[in-house]
Amino acid sequence: MATLDAKIPAGPIKDKWTNHKNKINVVNPANKRLIDVIVVGTGLAGGSAAASLAEMGYNVKAFCFQDSPRRAHSIAAQGGINAAKNYQNDGDSVYRLFYDTVKGGDYRAREANVYRLAEVSANIIDQCVAQGVPFARDYGGLLDNRSFGGVLVSRTFYAKGQTGQQLLLGAYSAMNRQIGKGKIKMYNRHEMLELVKVEGKARGIIARNLVTGEIERHSAHAVVIASGGYGNVFFLSTNAMGSNVTAAWRIHKKGAYFANPCYTQIHPTCIPRSGDYQSKLTLMSESLRNDGRIWVPKHMKDVEAIRNGSRKPTDLTEDERDYYLERRYPAFGNLVPRDVASRAAKERCDAGFGVNETGEAVYLDFASAIQRYGKEKATVLGEQNPSAQRVLELGEKVVEDKYGNLFQMYEKITDDNPYKTPMKIYPAVHYTMGGIWVDYNLMTTIPGCYAAGEANFSDHGANRLGASALMQGLADGYFVLPYTIGDYLADDIRTGEISTDTPEFEEAEKEVISRLEAFINNKGSKSVDHFHKRLGKVMWDKVGMARNEQGLKEAIEEIRQIREEFHKDVFVPGSMYELNPELEKAARVEDFLELGELFAYDALMRTESCGGHFREESAETDGPQKGEAKRDDENFAYVAAWEWTGDPGKATLHKEELTFNDIELKQRSYK
Amino acid sequence: MKLTLKIWRQKDRNDKGGIETYPIDNVSEHMSFLEMMDVLNEQLVSEGKEPVAFDHDCREGICGMCSMQINGEAHGPDRGVTTCQLHMRKFKDGDTIYIEPFRAKGFPIIKDLVVDRSAFDRIQHAGGFVSVNTSGNTQDANAIPIPKTDADNAFDAATCIGCGACVASCKNASAMLFVSAKVSQFALLPQGKVEAKRRVLNMVEQMDKEGFGNCTNTGACEVECPKGISLENIARMNREYLKASIFSE
């Protein structure tokens, strides 16, 4: 078995990427025309990769399951994108962004990758502006910034609460330019169901046309997986309904190692769940923590009064409120990283201070921000001694300009007006830091198969900082992969077109057909969602925000049980050769049921707490950090990369030791 | 809540299709419209019947995948929302709700409530971009200051989610609001000015080829648009188009 070589270039960290780019092989423009590349997924990573590769001259075939590449779930990212531009003159730098990201990831990311990410971050902003992405600007016409959790500078660029949408439309427009030229062949409403390997190399995929149900063979010299994360293994998450692990899981089963599956981000500010019928959870952007203050009542009697409706949150005086993040983490306050904020909310709610009927909600309050902005605005307008009403009016307008769409979304879902009463929020599954293991070149352990964006594991360690996902997706797609893939493809200039008329394609196609036929022919009695919900409940209860040995062992057993029942008793109506959403779901849930077990297994193995992975057995027991997560660098400063062996519970562990030469490993304190 | 749903069922593109009636019980007012559809589908599956096919993905009003003509209105009776953000509290116990696909020549029906909106993609292929390579070696992002009002107006136009409600709401099935939003975004920004003429001519030409109708200024599109895209964009596109036609290269 191949050893896990991350192929990190030698030399000082600040020169690695430049030197590497200068030394790797390139394919000459005439030869690029002879090479095909498949890109699966058209979010920020896949869309930008497809556009860049096509622009360089490769023939790109891009696939998405949505009806248009513009609908990939990157579109829903709200808050912003980080870049070390230092436009605010607050001392930001590439090193500081690098440092914050490694620290934010609780020292479980690969230094060299993160440095490169920080290095190219500034180019992303330049690129996007050149493409016509309408970022927020100030009255001087220059770009505006806001702050995000876990950092002490203002480096986040944004477009109201729709940054992901605007960036994705930028990448989509770059794709459109290439589609129009015929350099990208776009396959909408297609889902990759298998990877095809020829002589050990990734040479194509089997995809299903979701409209006709036809199974299609597509060949290429390299395959890029940019299919996003696997948060939907929890059933309820902030992911889109269609977000799935299938492409990633299929390459895993063909030999790509899956790294750190247990690293999940539970986002602290989501709208709490309301009932059993709930199909998804909605995020309220982290940017709201710039101005919103998080609290619960200090006294139990007020919690009860709020729950039975005899007091309103706005009735409580400052003294009666517990701004627990400001209390516990004075340095970072409401802007602590997501994992810390989520655990703090859980701690208060577990202690009984949750403010809704289910006891799973805390307040996110904008009253102070509205006051502050209202007074500022009155001063700017030259209004002396404005009335309280006037301050409120002006303040609400400022808040609306900043977060209008988020407030509207909240109001539509909950029927509460967040300008007048604090929002109720609770943590929810949002992002998965784990993913397909890749080397410095973003190549998986399968030659010619690459993974980019959320689908890979590389840059965020055990916890991702806010506004870093967009940065990573675009960095991978625009600036990293298009270069590094050339190094591999340089050996393929004489290969010629890859035929799909070979035993390898035939066999892969047969496997896919028999998998799908099994669903259609199964005489089961329960819907796909029935099983997905059960899996989600086990994952949330036992593999969620806090994990322990016993719970994880139970989870593994229960997931195996659900998987067995699923195969026996799932009912999929309709036929294979038509638009059949239930069949699509069945194939995805089958993969989630396997991934879920590996996920729990990985969490069981990692007995330390780090970032989003919190093991109850591993917490600080005394001192100023009491109750905080306790990392174990001596035994766990490695990436856990799992190799498929035919059973998710029997995967083989490969370790990539993490070395930190440029950052000292320290306890991660936000106090 | 107890409701009667009258839903358009159509096997595929060539099927004639028709309305079917489904009674549904136990609908909570806190459910979103699509969660209500999930409950119906779960019920149909448990009866061994085929569930109703409908497009949806993000369920937070931003991907533009969901559609549906509900009681004759694109995205239903609420304003400024997509179907996924519409909640059942907007309906009353005992209501009969008609659910149909978006209807337009440019949006052929694929199945039930699912329509083919790829015409929108093709219009964008014709010019919905700035021709700049993705090398990252462009000028510094702050090299050209852009007046805040221009940036804000460009952003407002760019918030279009491409759902097609404008087309479905228009008696002429015109796509002018959609196309003008994209044309406006770029026309308002210095980066987009260089190719402005070519862009507007090509995109309008493609729009006509796709079989969308003309604009007769009834304004239904603006009313039904979940993102509040303004009719001003259509006026701007018309100006751009006229300019480009007179002074083309």
Image (spheres, coloured by chain):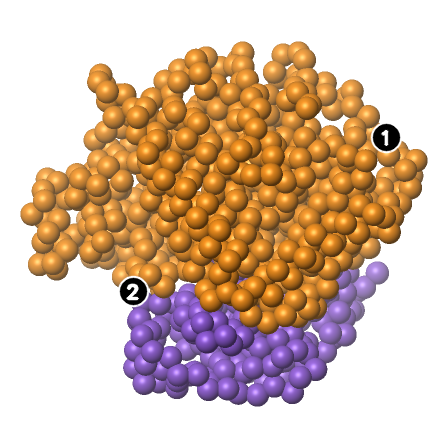
Q: Residue at x 79, y 30 (%)?
A: A488
* Chain identifier for the purple-coloured part of the image: B
| A43 w.r.t. A256: above or below | below
* Left or right, residue B195 beside residue A503: left
Q: Residue at x 33, y 61 (%)?
A: A276
**Figure quadrant of residue A253:** top right
Give me the disc on residue A415: 2
* Left or right, residue A221 beside residue B32: right
Q: Is residue A525 visible?
A: yes
Give the percent coordinates (x, y) of residue A121: 58, 32
Picture quarter with the C terminus of chain B: bottom right
The amino acid beneath tag 2 is Asp
* Chain identifier for the orange-coloured part of the image: A
**Figure quadrant of residue A622:** top left
Please give the residue where the numbered disc 1 appears in the rendered image: A491
* Left or right, residue A146 beside residue A112: left
Q: Residue at x 65, y 87 (%)?
A: B16
Q: Residue at x 27, y 21 (%)?
A: A620
| B211 w.r.t. A10: above or below | below
Give the percent coordinates (x, y) of residue A507: 77, 49
For the residue pair B193 and A598, the one nearer the viewer reads as: A598
Q: Are marks 2 and 1 in contact (CB under 8 Å)?
A: no
- Crowding at dot 2, Cα within 10 Å, few <14 / some 14-19 / many 20+, comes out as few
Give the percent coordinates (x, y) of residue A320: 10, 42
The amino acid beneath tag 1 is Asp
